[in-house]
Amino acid sequence: MTHHTDSTITRLITGASSGIGLALVQHWLEDDAPVVAVSRRATDSEALQRLQQQGLPLRCVNTDLRSEASLLNLVRELKDSGTELRQIINCAGVLHDKESGLAPEKRLEDVSVQALQQSFALNAFAPILLARHLLPLVSKQQQACFASISARVGSIEDNHLGGWYSYRASKAAQNQLLRTLAVETRRRHPNLCVLALHPGTTDTPLSAPFQRNVPEHKLFSPPRAAKQLAAIIDGAGENQHGRFIAWDGEPIPW
């Protein structure tokens, strides 16, 4: 199966060991396009190891996006290997976490400093720090893309249900940070397209506890979500720059 992808494009994908991130790694590797897979335990991921054993152009780098020291190690590793990136796709995010007890808030009494900090660290701060450290490695001569997975629930205008305080707010913060990045890079990096993407509800560990009310035709498999997002990312140009776009190409209000 071929997607007619430019196999000379090197892509870096975060959140690469599960869910949409892993599905995007698999999608682009099908075309033999080189991928740098980044997650906290990328080298321990059985799924990524299986892909490497097939001799595909995949590099795995362990990185904790919440740590600047870890991000600097990632940059050093990419520089040492002479890697020039054309696309950076951030798929890392957190909605709930059993270990720390993080869960979406149903009401005001559920709000806590710990949950807010945990959500903002990965959903808001990580994408902009990723851009800050990795954009110097992105080609300025060719069309390039920095895309990050956001969520429709991060839209302030679209918030009619309430709840999920820290997740909603951290995604809204990510959107504003990406929009600000888009304004600056239009001048400093004119061939770069910056995108916030809503993948739709996808059957991943992140959404697993919350799928009950999702109609079957609106719950995407990771490969389908990846294919839809990859089409947007690979086709991204001036018209998409600085926009918040859903999986079907439709704009989402901020």
Image (spheres, grey):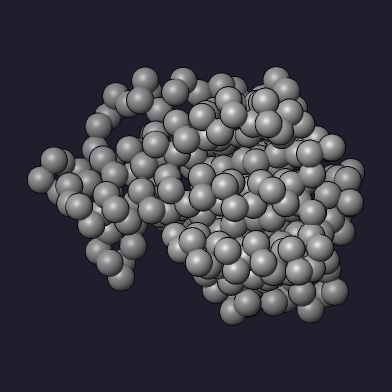
Q: Nearer the viewer, residue 241 or 190?
A: 190
The residue at 77%/74% (across/down) is: 52
251 horizontally vs 215: left or right: right
Q: Position of residue 188 (x, y in %)?
A: 68, 31
Q: Residue at x 79, y 60 (%)?
A: 83
Please tell me which residue lies in front, 179 or 93: 179
Against 240, residue 72 (above or below) is below
**Residue 185, can we see it?**
yes
Locate residue 160: give its quadrant: top left
Relative to 44, residue 184 above or below: above
From the viewer's perspective, tell me whether residue 101 is left or right of residue 150: left
In the rendered image, residue 87, in percent from the top left (x then y), is placed at 72, 46
71 and 162: which one is in front?
Answer: 71
Residue 105 position in % (x across, y down): 22, 46
Q: How many marks?
A: 0
Which quadrant is home to the C terminus?
Answer: top left
Q: Residue furthest front?
A: 188
Say whether residue 56 is left or right of residue 159: right
**Rendered residue at 79%/44% (across/down):** 139
Percent x, y for residue 171? 41, 39
Compared with residue 57, is residue 199 higher up or lower down, i.e. above or below?
A: above
In percent of the image, x 79 and y 54: which residue is there? Answer: 84
Look at the image and tell me whether residue 203 can be seen.
no
